[in-house]
Image: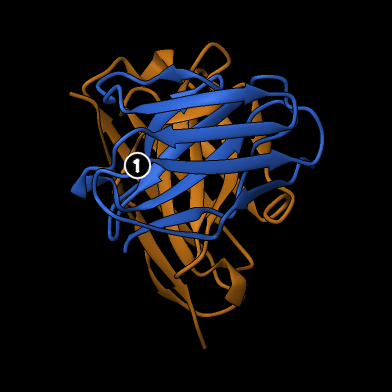
Amino acid sequence: EVVLTQSPATLSLSPGERATLSCRASQSVRYFLAWYQQKPGQAPRLLIYDSSTRATGIPARFSGSGSGTDFTLTISSLEPEDFAVYYCQQRSNGLTFGGGTKVEIK
Amino acid sequence: QVQLLESGGGVVQPGRSLRLSCAASGFTFNNYAMHWVRQAPGKGLEWVGFISYDGSNKYYGDSVKGRFTISRDNSKNTLYLQVTSLRLEDTAVYYCAKGFGYYEEYFDPWGQGTLVTVSS
């Protein structure tokens, strides 16, 4: 099973700042990685798939990069609605999720 | 638009069974693979299982293999999850999600979830 490790566990930032979230895989997942956003009391929402492709309707301030074992989700300038928990997920070898990164208001 | 609506959750004793349902609308249900994903209270996401568009292929996560069964009724646009031999650690919100991407192994969109609480 591929283990995904997300860091940091919590990111404290102010609106307008840049957020950089990391997801590291225990073995190569090529580019088969997605990112999801989850707000309290809501279901997750797909943001990015295949490492860098934005899902329909996702604002351009969200971008993904990486391949192999190291991936990054970047939010270029945080909007108030972006404070949430973010999960990565791989589909290269089974289907597994990372433990999540909470982006909170500083 | 695509809508997924789960139901069937509740409080159940350890060892008992439950059937969860997911009613789909807004897309051609019988063209798409579907998944179940769960989330224990305050915890992260765990993939539960997958069913192909026609029900011919099913895959499960290791923690539920042999206890949970996914099925679908394409005539009713409904996905099911039969959960048996429930354990305390099966307590979670159970989400259904439409398969997305070339191999339908991403999840989009998700339903709002149904809570299963296993308690004596």
Quadrant, the C terminus of chain A: bottom left
Q: Judge from the rendering whether residue B43 lies leftward or rightward of residue A29; answer left or right.
A: left
Q: Residues within 10 Å of mark 1 (few under 14, many from 20)?
A: many
Quadrant in the picture for the N terminus of chain A: top right
- Of residues B78 and A6, the one nearer the viewer is A6
Residue A97 versus residue B27 in the image, above or below: below
Whether residue B106 sits left or right of residue B73 in the image: it is right
Front position in the image: B52 or A89: A89
Say whether residue B68 is left or right of residue A20.
right
Q: x, y (%) of residue B70?
A: 55, 40
Q: Quadrant of residue A44?
A: top left
Provide the chain ID for the residue under circle 1: B
Q: Which chain is blue?
A: A
SS for callout 1: strand
Residue at x-position 58% and y-position 42%: A22
Residue drawn at the location 51% of the way across and 43% of the way down? A21
Q: Position of residue B84 (x, y in %)?
A: 60, 61
Residue A29 picture quarter: top right
Instruction: Name the colouring of the figure.
Output: by chain
Q: Is residue B5 above or below residue A28?
A: below
Position of residue A52 relative to residue A2, above or below, is above
Residue A27: x and y, percent? 82, 34
Q: Position of residue B38 (x, y in %)?
A: 50, 54
Residue closest to the far bottom: B120
Please name the amino acid that badge 1 sits on. Answer: Cys
**Residue B40 appears left or right of A16:** right
* Count of numbered tags: 1
Tell me the residue at 35%/34% (across/down). Answer: B78
- Judging depth in this view, the residue of A17 and A67 nearest the camera is A17
In the rendered picture, chain B carries what hue? orange
Q: Is residue B29 above or below residue A44?
A: above
Disc 1 marks which residue? B22
